[in-house]
Image (spheres, rainbow, N blue to C red):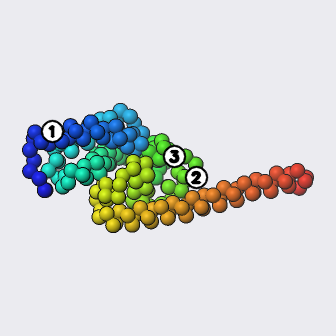
């Protein structure tokens, strides 16, 4: 804890952050949860937690990443609570259950080969990519949001981009192979072969 918790200072600081970052935190939570009403509630919860934990913010310039970290944890806490209540896994699908929260978040923003490619890379790398690319976090903000050093965040993001490139190339190859198979089938049917 690097600063003393002062109620008036914390209130003014978090109110300023709310005015500046409310919409992007809400958008992040909507993409993560695919439930606008829940995202609105959790946005409020995130800023309440920011107020209560004001003393944990080490530097004011890290406030945006700090907010993302709080919002992410608030959402995960809610998902864990729902998982316990509804037994819906965070990743993967349970037979007969509603789609996982991760799948819903991915479906909201992505489709096709990119979605399939992202699903193939490790969760931590996927989180780094989504935070960096969709939310335009700087390297320092990404590091703070992920709870790692700047060097580690950069390494994770570099590996994530390479993993995504490889997964996208594999998706492209699979699509081309499927198209070639369809073309060959139609050509065979046109010749009268079966």
| Residue sitting nearer the eye, 140 or 51 | 140
Marks 2/3 in contact by CB < 8 Å: the verdict is no
Q: Residue furthest top?
A: 37
Quarter residue 16 falls in = top left
Q: Residue at x 69, y 57 (%)?
A: 176
Q: Residue at x 17, y 53 (%)?
A: 56
Q: Residue at x 47, y 47 (%)?
A: 106
Q: Residue at x 49, y 64 (%)?
A: 162
Quarter residue 140 falls in = bottom left
The residue where tag 3 is placed is: 110
> With respect to residue 36, does 119 lie above or below?
below
Q: Taking 81 as reference, is 103 left or right?
A: right
Q: Taking 96 as reference, is 191 left or right?
A: right
Tag 3 secondary structure: loop
Q: Is residue 139 visible?
A: yes
The residue where tag 2 is placed is: 113
Q: Residue furthest front?
A: 61
Q: Taking 54 as reference, is 131 left or right?
A: right
> With respect to residue 53, does 37 lie above or below?
above
Q: How far, Cα to Cα, is label 2 from label 3?
A: 9 Å
Q: How far, Cα to Cα, is label 1 from label 3?
A: 37 Å
Q: How far, Cα to Cα, is label 1 from label 2?
A: 45 Å
Sequence-earlier tag: 1 or 2 = 1
The residue where tag 1 is placed is: 11
Marks 1/3 in contact by CB < 8 Å: the verdict is no
Measured from the top left, where is residue 50 in percent x and y? 21, 44
Q: Viewer-nearest of labels 1 and 2?
A: 1
Q: Residue furthest right?
A: 192
Marks 1/2 in contact by CB < 8 Å: the verdict is no
Tag 1 secondary structure: helix
Is the residue marked by circle 3 packed among few (<14), some (14-19), or many (20+) residues within 10 Å? few
| Residue sitting nearer the eye, 117 or 65 | 65
């Amino acid at each position: 804890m690097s600063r003393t918790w002062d109620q008036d200072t914390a209130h003014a600081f978090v109110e300023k952050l709310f005015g500046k970052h409310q919409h992007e935190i809400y958008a992040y939570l909507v993409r993560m949860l695919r439930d606008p009403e829940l995202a609105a509630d959790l946005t409020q919860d995130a800023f309440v937690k920011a107020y209560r934990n004001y003393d944990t913010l080490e530097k004011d310039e890290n406030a945006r990443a700090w907010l993302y970290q709080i919002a992410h944890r608030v959402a995960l806490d809610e998902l864990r609570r729902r998982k316990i209540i509804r037994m819906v896994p965070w990743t993967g699908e349970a037979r007969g259950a509603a789609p996982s929260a991760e799948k819903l978040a991915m479906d909201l923003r992505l489709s096709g080969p990119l979605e399939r490619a992202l699903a193939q890379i490790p969760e931590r790398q996927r989180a780094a990519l989504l935070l960096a690319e969709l939310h335009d976090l700087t390297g320092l903000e990404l590091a703070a949001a992920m709870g790692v050093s700047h060097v580690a965040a950069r390494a994770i993001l570099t590996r994530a981009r390479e993993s995504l490139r490889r997964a996208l190339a594999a998706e492209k190859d699979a699509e081309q192979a499927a198209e070639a198979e369809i073309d060959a089938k139609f050509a065979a049917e046109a010749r009268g072969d079966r």
